[in-house]
Amino acid sequence: STAASDTDEQPSVGSTIGTELPRPGAMARAQLAATEEPEAQGGLTQGLAEKIVFGKLDRSRLALPMLLSGACDGADETFGEMAVEHQHRLVHFLGPGDEEWASAKAKEKQSHAFQHVKAELLQDKVVSEAFDRAGESRVLGSQRTPDWRARVAEMASRRNFLQVRRADAVYVVGWRLEKGKDQFSGKRDIDPRSVPLLDVGGGTGWACQWY
């Protein structure tokens, strides 16, 4: 799942595995239902990103509920704070360079949940095929320039794939694209036919598209 509060903030992503959390601020989240008794809280998230990507996640072995997020300002840090307060598991997926954009609060109080994801995994065939398939519906007309993949990458969208890959449900509150505005900034004028039908903006929109 994914979260974004407005067009001026970094794209934020939050998803939960297990029971539902309260809804602080503008956010989106995906929920995975717990199917069996979870393991103890310790030693849980090793290799979580790889298991999600390659379809090897055994949810019966997870300590649930679990929040998957991205440690950005706003929804990510607040949702993470609520997860910790309610004794839910928390994982912030961070791709190369993403920690630079992590919020001060997340760095101070939630760094134990940071899981760094290697570029090789985010560029894996599974993720890349999902990326291109979503792009067919999201990057249209005048927006489909030769560098569109690099422009989307600036929204840290590939890591958002990890949020929704194994989600049972996604709940989204975020900024929406106006007709005739580009999806990268939400401000630049474009041909209205180039606006995706699933009109959630930023990296949040990509997570929704993947789901």
Image (cartoon, rainbow, N blue to C red):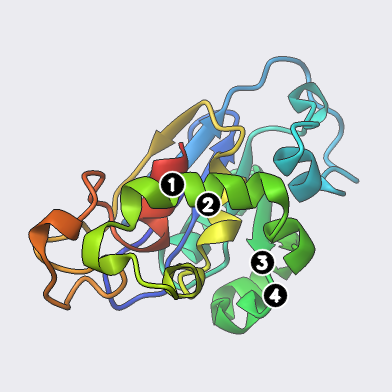
Q: CA distance from mark 1 to mark 3?
A: 21 Å
In the rendered structure, which disc, 1 or 3, sits on the residue that comes first in sequence? 3
For image coordinates 59% across by 46% down, the residue present is 129
Across and down, in percent, residue 125 comes to 70, 49
Residue position for label 2: 131
Q: What is the number of the mark on residue 94?
A: 3
Residue 149, above or below 192: below
For image coordinates 58% across by 76% down, the residue present is 102
Pointer 2 with pointer 1, Cβ within 8 A: yes
In the rendered structure, which disc, 2 or 3, sits on the residue that comes first in sequence? 3
For image coordinates 72% across by 69% down, the residue present is 111
In the rendered structure, which disc, 1 or 4, sits on the residue that comes first in sequence? 4
Residue sitting farthest toward the top? 36
Neighbours of disc 2 within 10 Å: few (<14), some (14-19), many (20+): many
Q: Is 108 in front, or is 12?
A: 12
For image coordinates 29% across by 49% down, the residue present is 173
Residue position for label 4: 96
Going by the numbered disc 2, the residue's amino acid type is Phe
Across and down, in percent, residue 9 comes to 36, 75
Going by the numbered disc 3, the residue's amino acid type is Leu
Going by the numbered disc 1, the residue's amino acid type is Ala
Q: CA distance from mark 2 to mark 1?
A: 5 Å
Residue position for label 1: 134
Going by the numbered disc 4, the residue's amino acid type is Pro
Q: CA distance from mark 3 to mark 4?
A: 7 Å
Q: Secondary structure at mark 2?
A: helix
